[in-house]
Image (tube, rainbow, N blue to C red):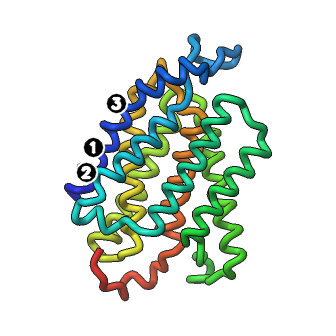
Amino acid sequence: MREYLLTLLVAATLCYLVTPIIEHLAIRWRVVAAIRDRDIHTAITPRWGGVAMWIALGLTLLMVRDLHLVGKAYGRELQGIFLAATFVVLLGALDDRYELDAVTKLAGQGLAAGILLIHGIQILWLPINGILIIPSNIGQLLTVLSVMVTINAVNFIDGLDGLAVGVVAIASGCFFAFSYLLAVTNGFTRAGAPSLITVILIGLCIGFLPHNSNPARMFMGDSGSMLLGLILAASAITLTGQIDANALSEENIGP
């Protein structure tokens, strides 16, 4: 647990420190949210909080990879999550600056889900009448839909200062608790990547929250909501969509 707590602290600290730098760049390049009649903020506020979180994510993954327990989570799935996260942050950053149309954003989200599929992150079964193994093409479709729905759900709740990061932090905490028990206590190797990525996600939310609390000095923008939504969806699919709960007692390999 100490390694995961250290990882959380590193992610939170990096996100807290990197955010003011990105805030300055966003103001300089006019990546800001204009004031509208229905908005609660009264000053022009920079976006691109997701860019700061992505930088903190990448640096955290580099810094903790040599830890004994955490390092075992590095593999194809974690690589796929980071590549997909990079893609959606780029897409969201462009949207924050140029306001892309809805079709372009949905297509981009679908491509990000495709990156996850390429790296083996896919829904393989559903808890219907016990365990229902689904065909690969249906699993791929459900994976894409799950990713897109989660991304847009996070984007939808990103309307009040600190709301989205707070909700995602709580959800990530629940996922981490479950995946940690599977990975460390029960020795289920497939839960290693979700354990790591969710604890980093908690750290990112904690580190960004002081900048996003009312009155917010910075918004996470679409780059942030897409990043949080994608990581949340990917960790959930990796944890629950690929792990047969009935097989837990049969797994005897260490984390």
Query: Quick one: label 3, few (<14), some, or many (20+) residues within 10 Å?
Result: some
Question: Pointers 3 and 1 in contact (CB under 8 A)?
Answer: no
Question: Pointers 2 and 1 in contact (CB under 8 A)?
Answer: yes
Q: Which residue is mark 3?
A: 17
Q: Which residue is mark 1?
A: 9
Q: Amino acid at mark 1?
A: Leu
Question: Which residue corresponds to the image point at 65% horizontal and 46% vertical from the top-left?
Answer: 152
Q: Quadrant of residue 177?
A: bottom left
231 to the left or right of 61:
right
Question: Which residue corresponds to the image point at 41% horizontal and 56% vertical from the top-left?
Answer: 197
Question: Which residue corresponds to the image point at 52% horizontal and 74% vertical from the top-left?
Answer: 242
Secondary structure at badge 2 equals helix
Secondary structure at badge 1 equals helix
| Viewer-side residue, 103 vs 251 | 103
Which numbered disc, 3 or 1, marks the residue closer to the eye? 3
| Viewer-side residue, 235 vs 20 | 20
Residue 5 circle label: 2
**Image coordinates for residue 215, horizontal then vertical, percent:** 48, 18
Residue 73 circle label: none
Q: Quadrant of the N terminus?
A: bottom left
| Viewer-side residue, 158 vs 12 | 12
Sooner in the amino-acid sequence: mark 2 or mark 3? 2
Question: Pointers 2 and 3 in contact (CB under 8 A)?
Answer: no
Q: Amino acid at mark 3?
A: Leu
Q: Quadrant of the C terminus?
A: bottom left
**Whole-Å distance between the Cαs marked 2 and 1?**
6 Å
